């Protein structure tokens, strides 16, 4: 039954994609817009296949995903440390709140000129921008999660004379998991945005520069179909991660534990 | 019952979509070519190579040659933006180097070159003492330039083709940066080891201790060439012959003005660039800085770009890419 529902969802989605595709194609065929602005669907698909076969887009995608994973990992660790500190100590709470107030409104791209001065133009600069855009919303989410845990849980832990790490592992993390998951989701979305914009500015270091660079390169050589094929890959990865990773993770944890519906 | 409503919903959504489409397509249909009053939109970029345009703007030369004309000047950050604005019919005239023009023409943009604007000393500058030619770059070096497909990139590739028989040898070292960012990165003497740039940035860089030029534009190309050309859309040229002629005349007047009155030009430009007048005068009379309407180097750029796959075809006839009465060197 459940499988059926899931299958139906995909059918609906495919149906709508087909409809949108037909509308797109009819606009392209109407000849109202230059193909340099509005390429036809088969041009876009052709260009996508070409860059898959040549391996170009695969290489760039792997490069981007690698950067994202690295930076998300670093971001999650930093966010965990900061929010645990702010829950356990009043002094740190003030510090972390001040840090968030200062850094959260700053878009990573606005920091770009400074980051180039500090770190140069390599991949470490991109990682820095992603970590910056991931950490602050995640700290907000995690510390809200920790704070929403009923105090009695923590007192229970103290009663059992659990150490800091045991409290974190057995009480704080499981009890705030829905917030953690929401934080990771927001982090993932913001990481993508930061990554693509940073890559478009930096260009290739060592010949390969990620999906943002791929799109930029297509732009400067006026390959509009190529720009769309880059966008399609970004959308596909977004859908895959949402459906395969986050939904599965939710099912295996918070839904199974009965913490959310 | 439920099934019925869902079919109805889909029907409603589809109707909305199609109405939306209809509105979008009819919006685009408005008459852009109203004949009362002449209009022209011109895009320039920042740099001394565009000096005649600043003169044309400040002295209102176009307005003198064609009273009642409404001139709209836009300064855009890079060639791709100019190209896209011209494609969307938001601009009539754009100024850029020959390679980006050829890329657009190759992809089907309907435009042609209307005039040359300037030749300019451009070159590759580095702070590293042990780099004397492009052969001395290692895989740890980084070369900043505006973007792939820019004239700087094509010139570097030309030099690579000559030195290494492979135009793409140094492509892995490239970092895309606007001229001012590239200059700051180079002066920081960190990971950006070299910068391919144009005036005034190249002059400022070479003033610094230890900075030296390892490749000039004309060495890369093997001859002098036109750095910036003026390009107009077919639509503008065909629909507005009066404005087109006035524009070409004004452009040539502006070039002549710089030749005849360098001091006065420097004064006008000093305001624009926020530089001292003496410095501007030195720059615009620098050896290799030439303002003229003759276009040079079309064939070399085209042959090289076709040979290395940057564009797919060569023009059959020079008239495919330039308007009538344009001076060019064969």
Image: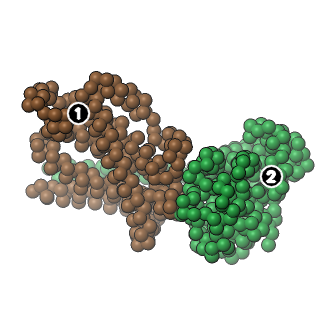
Chain colours: A brown, B green
Residue at 13 percent across and 33 percent down: it is A162
The verdict on a common chain for dots 1 and 2 is: no
Q: Nearer the viewer, residue B223 or A4?
A: B223
Q: How far apart are marks 1 and 2 (CA)?
A: 66 Å
Pointer 1 residue: A145
Locate residue B297 relative to residue B27 in the image: left or right. right
Q: Where is residue A52 in the image (x, y as percent from the top left)?
A: 40, 69
Left of A19 or right of it: where is B315?
Answer: right
The answer to which image quadrant residue A138 occupies is top left
User: Image point 63% across, 60% down: which residue?
Assistant: B150
Which numbered marker is on residue B251?
Answer: 2
Is label 2 in a helix, a strand or a loop?
A: helix
What percent of the width, then of the height, locates residue A250? 19, 47
| 1 vs 2, front mark | 1
Q: Residues within 10 Å of mark 2 (few under 14, many from 20)?
A: many
Location of residue A207 with respect to B284 vertically, above or below: below
Where does the C terminus of chain B fall, quadrant-wise? Answer: bottom right
Viewer-closest of B93 and B19 = B93
| Rendered view: B23 above or below A86 | below
Classify residue A250 as left or right of residue B249. Answer: left
């Amino acid at each position: 039954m459940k499988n059926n529902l899931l299958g139906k969802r995909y059918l609906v989605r495919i149906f709508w994609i087909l409809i949108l595709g037909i509308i797109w194609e009819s606009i392209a065929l109407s000849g109202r817009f230059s193909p340099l602005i509005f390429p036809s669907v088969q041009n876009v698909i052709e260009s996508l296949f070409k860059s898959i076969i040549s391996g170009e887009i695969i290489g760039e995608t792997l490069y981007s995903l690698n950067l994202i994973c690295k930076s998300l990992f670093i971001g999650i660790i930093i966010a965990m440390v900061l929010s645990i500190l702010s829950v356990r100590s009043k002094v740190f709470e003030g510090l972390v709140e001040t840090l968030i107030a200062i850094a959260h409104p700053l878009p990573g791209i606005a920091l770009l000129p400074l980051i180039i001065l500090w770190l140069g133009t390599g991949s470490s600069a991109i990682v820095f921008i992603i970590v910056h855009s991931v950490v602050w919303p995640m700290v907000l989410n995690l510390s809200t999660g920790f704070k929403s845990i009923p105090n009695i849980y923590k007192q229970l832990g103290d009663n059992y004379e659990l150490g800091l790490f045991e409290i974190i592992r057995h009480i704080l993390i499981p009890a705030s998991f829905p917030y953690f998951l929401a934080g990771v989701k927001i982090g993932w979305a913001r990481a993508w945005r930061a990554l693509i914009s940073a890559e478009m500015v930096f260009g290739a270091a060592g010949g390969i520069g990620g999906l943002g660079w791929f799109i930029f390169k297509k732009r400067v050589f006026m390959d509009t179909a190529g720009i769309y094929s880059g966008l399609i890959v970004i959308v596909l990865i977004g859908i895959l991660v949402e459906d395969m990773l986050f939904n599965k993770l939710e099912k295996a944890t918070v839904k199974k534990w009965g913490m959310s519906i | 019952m439920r099934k019925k409503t869902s079919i109805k919903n889909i029907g409603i959504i589809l109707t909305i979509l199609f109405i939306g489409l209809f509105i979008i397509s009819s919006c685009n249909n408005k008459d852009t070519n109203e004949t009362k009053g002449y209009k022209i939109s011109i895009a320039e970029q920042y740099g001394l190579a565009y000096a005649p345009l600043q003169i044309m703007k400040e002295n209102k030369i176009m307005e003198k040659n064609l009273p009642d004309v409404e001139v709209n000047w836009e300064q855009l950050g890079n060639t791709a933006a100019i190209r896209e604005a011209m494609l969307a019919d938001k601009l009539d005239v754009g100024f850029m180097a020959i390679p980006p023009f050829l890329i657009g023409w190759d992809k089907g943009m309907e435009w042609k070159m209307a005039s040359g604007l300037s030749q300019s000393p451009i070159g590759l500058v580095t702070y590293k003492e042990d780099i004397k030619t492009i052969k001395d770059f290692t895989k740890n070096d980084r070369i900043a330039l505006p973007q792939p497909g820019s004239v700087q990139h094509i010139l570097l590739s030309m030099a690579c083709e000559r030195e290494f028989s492979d135009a793409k040898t140094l492509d892995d070292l490239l970092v895309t940066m606007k001229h001012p960012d590239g200059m700051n990165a180079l002066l920081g003497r960190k990971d950006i080891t070299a910068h391919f740039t144009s005036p005034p940035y190249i002059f400022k860089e070479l003033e610094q201790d230890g900075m030296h030029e390892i490749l000039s534009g004309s060495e890369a190309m093997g001859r002098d060439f036109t750095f910036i050309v003026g390009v107009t859309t077919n639509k503008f040229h065909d629909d507005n012959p009066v404005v087109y002629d006035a524009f070409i005349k004004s452009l040539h007047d502006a070039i002549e003005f710089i030749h005849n009155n360098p001091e006065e030009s420097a004064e006008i430009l000093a305001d624009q660039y926020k530089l001292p007048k003496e410095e501007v005068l030195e720059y615009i009379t620098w050896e290799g800085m030439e303002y003229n309407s003759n276009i040079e180097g079309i064939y070399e750029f085209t042959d090289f770009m076709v040979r290395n796959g940057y564009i797919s075809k060569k023009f059959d006839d020079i008239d495919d890419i330039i308007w009538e009465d344009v001076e060019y060197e064969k």
